[in-house]
Amino acid sequence: SLCLTVLGYFVSNDFALSRAQDRFDFRVGEIHHAIEDRMHVYEQVLWGCVGLFNASTQVSRDEFREYINTLRIEKYWPGIQGVGFAVPVAAADRGAHVQGIRAEGFPEYDIKPAGERGEYSAIIYLEPFDWRNQRAFGYDMWSNEMRRDAMARARDEGVAATSGMITLVQETDKDVQKGFLTYLPVYKNGMARESVEQRREAFVGWVLCPFRAGDLMAGVLG
């Protein structure tokens, strides 16, 4: 009887562990597909922004704001910290770029972080333009290797590219979350884009979505 009891215990324990592992694996698969599906849907937000630029010779700040406000991302797209547009800035053009943005009504605007670099980028549109996103206004994402790798891949390949995990410049010292960004390139209308060289020549800037990982997972998983 003792031997049968011990044998029964091990058999039932193995069965219980196997069932638990199966349930765990199934749940992991569900979460994986839910995240993957959600990110594909969110990518369409960026493609919509690319379409906005493709349909216009010059998208103004007010037009960009109105487009993003219409999407109501805070209600329908949980996890997206905002939608932005960033441009490359040559070192020789930095002064003119800064003065141009300041003339639009942002007297404190500058490319940040400060310092001399061979190339810059700058976030010039970012909606909703709330206090958190204002921290990223003018930020040079090209100065960060993790962001730069994704930005270069989007520009050179003409595809959506996502950075590795980073801490967004929108974060403060409270409720700090890890995050990441997804980029899509914007090219000049009518220019060839068949090769990497042609895509670089036609390149205008990036539309981008910064994500706070905790908020994104709360939106996906509930």
Image (tube, grey):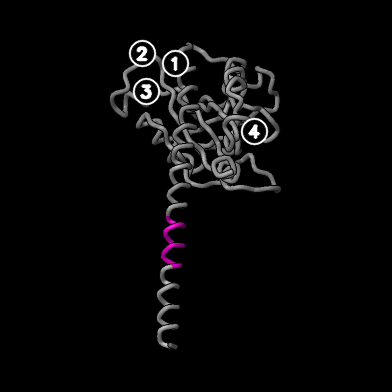
* Residue 27: % across, % down: 47, 52
**Image height of 98 relative to 32, above or below:** above
> Of the residues shown, which amino acid type is indicated by label 4?
Asn
Where the N terminus falls, by quadrant? bottom left
Specify which label sits upstream in the sequence, 2 or 1.
Answer: 1
The answer to which of 34 and 213 lies nearer the viewer is 34
* Disc 1: CA contacts within 10 A as few (<14), some (14-19) or many (>=20): some
Q: Which label is found at residue 133?
A: 4
Q: Name the residue under label 3.
A: 201
Alpha carbon distance from label 3 to label 1: 16 Å
* Extreme residue toward the left, this view: 194
Q: In which quarter of the image is residue 72?
A: top right
Do tag 3 and tag 4 residues touch (Cβ < 8 Å)? no
* Residue 163: % across, % down: 47, 42
Could you tell whether 58 is left or right of 61 in the image? Answer: left
**Image height of 54 relative to 138, above or below:** above
* Residue 193: % across, % down: 32, 22
Q: What span is in magenta?
A: 16-25
Q: In which quarter of the image is residue 60?
A: top right
Report the label total: 4
> Of the residues shown, which amino acid type is indicated by label 1?
Asn
Q: Nearer the viewer, mark 3 or mark 4?
A: 4
Q: Mark 1 points at which residue?
A: 54
* Disc 4: CA contacts within 10 A as few (<14), some (14-19) or many (>=20): many
Q: Which label is found at residue 190?
A: 2
Alpha carbon distance from label 2 to label 1: 10 Å
Q: Which of marks 2 and 3 is in front?
A: 2
Alpha carbon distance from label 4 to label 2: 33 Å
Specify which label sits upstream in the sequence, 2 or 3.
Answer: 2
The answer to which of 95 and 86 lies nearer the viewer is 86
